[in-house]
Image: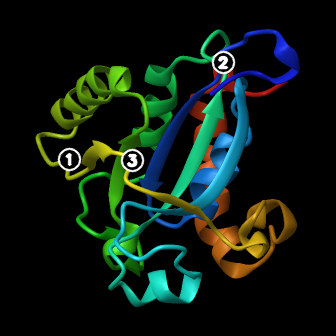
Amino acid sequence: MSGEGGNNMRMCTITLAGGCFWCLEAVYLRVAGVTAVQSGYANGHLPQPSYEQVCRGDTGHAEVVQLQYDPTQVELRALLEVFYAVHDPTTLNRQGNDVGPQYRSGIYWSDPADEPVVRAVTAEADALLGGGVVTELAPLSGFWPAEPEHDRYFERNPWQGYCAFVVGPKVAKFQQRFTSLLRR
Protein backbone atom coordinates (compact mmCIF):
# COMPACT_ATOMS: atom_id res chain seq x y z
CA MET A 1 0.00 0.00 0.00
CA SER A 2 1.48 3.35 -0.88
CA GLY A 3 1.43 6.52 1.16
CA GLU A 4 -0.42 9.71 0.32
CA GLY A 5 1.06 12.71 -1.41
CA GLY A 6 3.77 10.84 -3.27
CA ASN A 7 6.19 10.91 -0.32
CA ASN A 8 6.91 7.16 -0.63
CA MET A 9 5.76 6.54 2.94
CA ARG A 10 4.95 2.83 3.22
CA MET A 11 1.67 2.07 4.94
CA CYS A 12 0.93 -1.42 6.24
CA THR A 13 -2.31 -3.33 6.70
CA ILE A 14 -3.45 -5.98 9.16
CA THR A 15 -6.97 -7.37 9.64
CA LEU A 16 -8.14 -8.41 13.11
CA ALA A 17 -11.19 -10.31 14.39
CA GLY A 18 -11.91 -10.08 18.09
CA GLY A 19 -15.67 -10.27 18.49
CA CYS A 20 -17.88 -7.35 17.54
CA PHE A 21 -16.04 -4.93 15.27
CA TRP A 22 -17.39 -1.92 17.19
CA CYS A 23 -15.05 -2.81 20.10
CA LEU A 24 -11.86 -3.12 18.08
CA GLU A 25 -12.66 -0.07 15.97
CA ALA A 26 -13.14 2.09 19.08
CA VAL A 27 -9.79 0.95 20.50
CA TYR A 28 -7.70 1.25 17.34
CA LEU A 29 -9.05 4.71 16.45
CA ARG A 30 -7.16 5.83 19.58
CA VAL A 31 -3.78 4.32 18.63
CA ALA A 32 -1.09 6.71 17.42
CA GLY A 33 0.21 5.63 14.03
CA VAL A 34 -3.03 3.94 12.94
CA THR A 35 -4.11 5.98 9.93
CA ALA A 36 -7.36 4.19 9.06
CA VAL A 37 -9.73 1.70 10.67
CA GLN A 38 -12.40 0.01 8.55
CA SER A 39 -14.96 -2.38 10.01
CA GLY A 40 -15.89 -5.25 7.75
CA TYR A 41 -16.13 -8.95 7.09
CA ALA A 42 -13.26 -11.28 6.15
CA ASN A 43 -12.28 -14.84 5.36
CA GLY A 44 -15.71 -16.10 4.38
CA HIS A 45 -17.12 -17.64 1.22
CA LEU A 46 -19.89 -15.21 0.21
CA PRO A 47 -18.91 -12.11 -1.81
CA GLN A 48 -20.11 -8.77 -0.43
CA PRO A 49 -22.02 -10.13 2.57
CA SER A 50 -24.42 -7.96 4.53
CA TYR A 51 -24.38 -7.59 8.31
CA GLU A 52 -27.57 -9.65 8.51
CA GLN A 53 -26.03 -12.46 6.43
CA VAL A 54 -22.87 -12.54 8.54
CA CYS A 55 -24.92 -12.51 11.78
CA ARG A 56 -26.71 -15.69 10.66
CA GLY A 57 -23.30 -17.35 11.07
CA ASP A 58 -23.30 -19.35 7.82
CA THR A 59 -21.18 -17.16 5.50
CA GLY A 60 -17.87 -18.13 7.11
CA HIS A 61 -16.95 -14.48 7.69
CA ALA A 62 -15.55 -12.97 10.85
CA GLU A 63 -16.45 -9.46 11.95
CA VAL A 64 -13.12 -7.65 11.58
CA VAL A 65 -11.38 -4.33 11.57
CA GLN A 66 -8.83 -3.66 8.89
CA LEU A 67 -6.08 -1.36 10.13
CA GLN A 68 -3.86 0.77 7.98
CA TYR A 69 -0.85 1.95 9.96
CA ASP A 70 2.46 3.72 9.63
CA PRO A 71 5.17 1.27 10.76
CA THR A 72 7.50 4.17 11.55
CA GLN A 73 5.03 5.25 14.27
CA VAL A 74 3.63 1.95 15.57
CA GLU A 75 4.92 -1.59 15.12
CA LEU A 76 2.77 -4.58 14.23
CA ARG A 77 3.91 -6.22 17.47
CA ALA A 78 2.38 -3.37 19.51
CA LEU A 79 -0.90 -3.56 17.56
CA LEU A 80 -1.09 -7.28 18.25
CA GLU A 81 -0.28 -6.85 21.94
CA VAL A 82 -3.25 -4.46 22.16
CA PHE A 83 -5.39 -7.00 20.29
CA TYR A 84 -4.62 -9.78 22.76
CA ALA A 85 -5.19 -7.46 25.74
CA VAL A 86 -8.64 -6.14 24.76
CA HIS A 87 -10.45 -9.37 23.85
CA ASP A 88 -10.58 -12.96 25.07
CA PRO A 89 -8.62 -15.12 22.61
CA THR A 90 -9.41 -18.29 24.57
CA THR A 91 -13.11 -18.59 23.72
CA LEU A 92 -13.94 -20.30 20.44
CA ASN A 93 -16.47 -18.38 18.33
CA ARG A 94 -17.44 -16.18 21.25
CA GLN A 95 -16.79 -12.88 22.97
CA GLY A 96 -18.94 -12.46 26.07
CA ASN A 97 -22.59 -12.76 25.03
CA ASP A 98 -21.70 -12.52 21.32
CA VAL A 99 -21.75 -16.12 20.10
CA GLY A 100 -21.14 -17.53 16.63
CA PRO A 101 -18.32 -18.04 14.13
CA GLN A 102 -18.52 -14.39 13.08
CA TYR A 103 -17.24 -13.45 16.57
CA ARG A 104 -14.13 -15.66 16.43
CA SER A 105 -10.68 -14.42 17.29
CA GLY A 106 -8.49 -14.10 14.21
CA ILE A 107 -5.50 -12.36 12.69
CA TYR A 108 -5.37 -12.12 8.89
CA TRP A 109 -2.29 -10.76 7.16
CA SER A 110 -1.99 -9.31 3.67
CA ASP A 111 1.80 -9.27 3.65
CA PRO A 112 3.47 -12.70 4.10
CA ALA A 113 6.32 -10.93 5.92
CA ASP A 114 3.88 -10.28 8.80
CA GLU A 115 3.28 -13.97 9.49
CA PRO A 116 6.37 -14.54 11.71
CA VAL A 117 5.45 -11.56 13.93
CA VAL A 118 1.83 -12.72 14.13
CA ARG A 119 2.90 -16.23 15.12
CA ALA A 120 5.49 -15.01 17.66
CA VAL A 121 3.10 -12.62 19.45
CA THR A 122 0.38 -15.29 19.42
CA ALA A 123 2.77 -17.83 20.98
CA GLU A 124 3.64 -15.29 23.70
CA ALA A 125 -0.07 -14.65 24.40
CA ASP A 126 -0.72 -18.40 24.45
CA ALA A 127 2.06 -18.91 27.00
CA LEU A 128 0.75 -16.08 29.20
CA LEU A 129 -2.76 -17.54 29.07
CA GLY A 130 -1.71 -21.09 29.87
CA GLY A 131 -2.06 -22.53 26.38
CA GLY A 132 -5.68 -21.66 25.69
CA VAL A 133 -5.44 -19.28 22.72
CA VAL A 134 -7.79 -20.30 19.86
CA THR A 135 -7.08 -17.34 17.58
CA GLU A 136 -7.28 -18.22 13.89
CA LEU A 137 -4.09 -17.23 12.05
CA ALA A 138 -4.33 -17.06 8.26
CA PRO A 139 -3.64 -14.97 5.19
CA LEU A 140 -6.44 -12.52 4.42
CA SER A 141 -8.93 -14.16 2.08
CA GLY A 142 -11.31 -11.43 1.00
CA PHE A 143 -12.30 -8.30 2.88
CA TRP A 144 -15.63 -6.56 2.50
CA PRO A 145 -16.29 -3.20 4.21
CA ALA A 146 -19.23 -3.12 6.60
CA GLU A 147 -22.21 -0.89 5.99
CA PRO A 148 -21.63 2.82 6.75
CA GLU A 149 -23.87 2.75 9.83
CA HIS A 150 -21.17 0.71 11.59
CA ASP A 151 -18.47 3.37 11.06
CA ARG A 152 -17.40 5.02 14.33
CA TYR A 153 -20.36 3.38 16.04
CA PHE A 154 -19.07 3.83 19.58
CA GLU A 155 -18.25 7.49 19.01
CA ARG A 156 -21.77 8.13 17.72
CA ASN A 157 -23.59 5.94 20.31
CA PRO A 158 -21.59 5.99 23.57
CA TRP A 159 -24.68 5.64 25.78
CA GLN A 160 -26.30 2.81 23.80
CA GLY A 161 -26.39 -0.26 26.08
CA TYR A 162 -23.86 -2.43 24.22
CA CYS A 163 -21.49 0.50 23.84
CA ALA A 164 -21.75 1.55 27.47
CA PHE A 165 -21.36 -1.92 28.97
CA VAL A 166 -19.14 -3.76 26.46
CA VAL A 167 -17.26 -1.32 24.20
CA GLY A 168 -16.60 1.36 26.82
CA PRO A 169 -14.80 -0.94 29.29
CA LYS A 170 -12.55 -2.29 26.50
CA VAL A 171 -11.62 1.26 25.48
CA ALA A 172 -10.92 2.15 29.13
CA LYS A 173 -8.76 -0.97 29.56
CA PHE A 174 -6.74 -0.03 26.47
CA GLN A 175 -6.30 3.58 27.62
CA GLN A 176 -5.10 2.51 31.08
CA ARG A 177 -2.74 -0.23 29.91
CA PHE A 178 -1.27 1.31 26.74
CA THR A 179 -0.78 4.99 27.57
CA SER A 180 2.35 5.15 25.40
CA LEU A 181 0.30 4.21 22.31
CA LEU A 182 -2.45 6.79 22.78
CA ARG A 183 -3.03 9.26 19.99
CA ARG A 184 -2.17 12.74 21.27
Give the mark, 1 or 2, whose residue is nearer the N terminus.
1
Query: Dot 3 surroundings within 10 Å: few (below 14), some, or many (20 or more)?
Result: some
Residue 152's place in the image compared with 47, above or below, is: above
**Which image quadrant is residue 147 in?**
bottom right
Q: Residue at x 37, y 60 (%)?
A: 43
Q: CA distance from mark 1 to mark 2?
A: 26 Å
Amino acid type for the residue under numbered disc 2: Ser
Can you identify the residue that label 2 sits on? 180
Give the mark, 1 or 3, whose residue is nearer the N terminus.
1
Q: Residue at x 51, y 30 (%)?
A: 79
Q: Residue at x 82, y 9 (%)?
A: 7
Seen in the image, is 122 located left or right of residue 85? left
Q: Is residue 62 among the parts visible in the rendering?
A: yes
> The N terminus lies in which quarter of the figure?
top right
In the image, 173 versus 125, the foreground residue is 125
Residue 155's place in the image compared with 100, above or below, is: above
Q: Secondary structure at mark 3?
A: loop
Can you identify the residue that label 3 sits on? 140
Q: CA distance from mark 1 to mark 3?
A: 20 Å
Q: CA distance from mark 3 to mark 2?
A: 29 Å
Q: Residue at x 50, y 35 (%)?
A: 82
- Residue 137 in picture, x, y percent from top left: 26, 44
> Quick check: marks 1 and 3 in contact, CB under 8 Å?
no
Seen in the image, is 172 located left or right of residue 96? right
Amino acid type for the residue under numbered disc 3: Leu
Q: Secondary structure at mark 1?
A: loop
Give the mark, 3 or 2, whose residue is nearer the N terminus.
3
Q: Is residue 86 among the parts visible in the rendering?
A: no
In the image, 148 versus 155, the foreground residue is 148
- Residue 70 in picture, x, y percent from top left: 66, 20
